[in-house]
Image (spheres, helix red, strand yellow):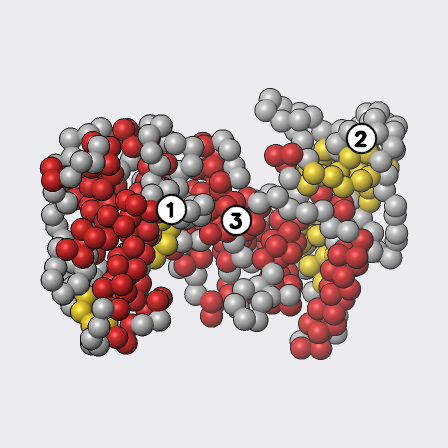
Amino acid sequence: MVAILISVAILLLASHPNGVLAASSEAPNSSTNDATNDDNEYESKIQQALSHHVTKSHQLLERALQEGGVAAAMEIGPDGNVASSTSGGQEELWQAEFALQAVERELKMLKDLKRGGKNKIDDDDDDDDSGDDDDDSGDGEEYDSGDDEEYFSGDDEEYFSGDDGDDYEYEDYSGDVHDELLKDKSLAALLDAIKDKNYRRDVYEEILDEAETKANLDPDLWHQYSYWNLHAYFSCHRVFAASRSVYDSEKWADLRQYYQVFRKQDEEDEPIPEGKPERTYQFSNDVFDPPLDPFQAGEKGRGLKAARDINKGELVFQATNNTVIFTNGHTWRNFLFAIYERNGDEETTEGDSETTCDVLVWSWVQALVDDGPLVIVADLDNGSLLNEGRDQPGWDKPNVRCGKEGDKSCMNDYYATKDIKEGDELLCDYREFALLDSWGDMGL
């Protein structure tokens, strides 16, 4: 590898009397050396890469010069030629070193394009290479210049490499938001952890759609955001694409304590007129220790399982002082933004999307009494982890219901509908209590 890089640098230096001609459109003359066909093809690919990218931006070597800390002694012309403002043989050494840096960047690109199974350089330049693109995905010599999985493209770095060897997965997408997502290292790592290609693409499409929605939101109109606007603003699809940890008792206690801080501040900022209902309150003063344990429930995310054997008809969960009620959507929206901004990163201006998205999806709309007004309900305890089941194909069957058998309405008491063994997951049909399409009725 080093020998090939040095030979490339020598070829580049020899191509111009005053320095490195990085933007040459001609491939090295392979007929004058004894390299094998593989070496010729390899060097040809390098030259194509250099031509392709320096044609787009003659600043390629300028960046390398700046990284080397000697940019003041060098000048780069619009054609990519490097000249020195000083005299001495050190110039040639500098030029060779920076040429190698440029080549190494392009090798990274070639390596990852090879992984993706498609030679983007050939497509863009429409050159004379008659080889099949699939040849680059064989078992021959790798275009390897390090372990990092990124390739250099113009002024930016892209991290999505299509590691499964199929066609480059995200090339069908376009737009500024998509281009920005491609530069996100953490998102690339998140997607790479998803092994199923179809599911991975579905996740990316959700994240992309959400990011495009967020890009079109006016931050000054946050008080008008709908439920799904909020979902997009806090990037909840992205949050839930990663594995989420189970809250410990301290985390729950902290969240409940902060709710009290928010409630007090809300009433101080806007006192409640006499005779008007509270904007938010706790469901009751009751406490209850349910026979449930939180756990990681695979594709469902977090869930609840029986901490012991539970008999049919037994009370397994109920709303308590940990259950909070919002009588209007605006106050609930304020609470989400308060959580988001409370633990945010001041340096990056990024808020606490994880906790905010948790509370957002753990909330639902419900009428607490028959024919009563709609409210928003949220459990600030492990009850929020109760996953959904339905008695229909494609679903796991529920074993918990809201209200006793025969009750006409749910009063936020949940009972076992069958004997449940210790360790079994608890599931409930959300439609028994949540009005899933009623966010608009709450001004959301």
- Residue 330 visible in this rendered orientation of the protein: no
Image location (x, y in percent) of residue 81: 16, 64
Label 2 close to label 1 by CB (< 8 Å): no
- Residue kind at label 3, given as amino acid type: Arg
Dot 1 alpha-carbon crowd within 10 angstroms: few under 14, some 14 to 19, many 20 or more: some
Amino acid at the residue labelled 2: Gly
Q: Residue at x 43, y 61 (%)?
A: 217
* Contact between labelled residues 1 and 3, with CB atoms less than 8 Å apart: no
Residue 255 appears in the picture as rendered = yes
Q: Which residue is mark 1?
A: 145
- Distance, label 2 to label 1, CA atoms, is 49 Å
Q: Looking at the image, is 438 positioned above or below residue 116?
A: below
The residue pinned by badge 2 equals 423
Q: Is residue 205 above or below residue 77?
A: above
Name which of mark 2 and mark 1 comes first in the sequence. Answer: 1
Task: Point out the frontmost of discs 3 and 1.
Answer: 1
In what element is the residue under mark 2?
loop
Secondary element at tag 1: loop
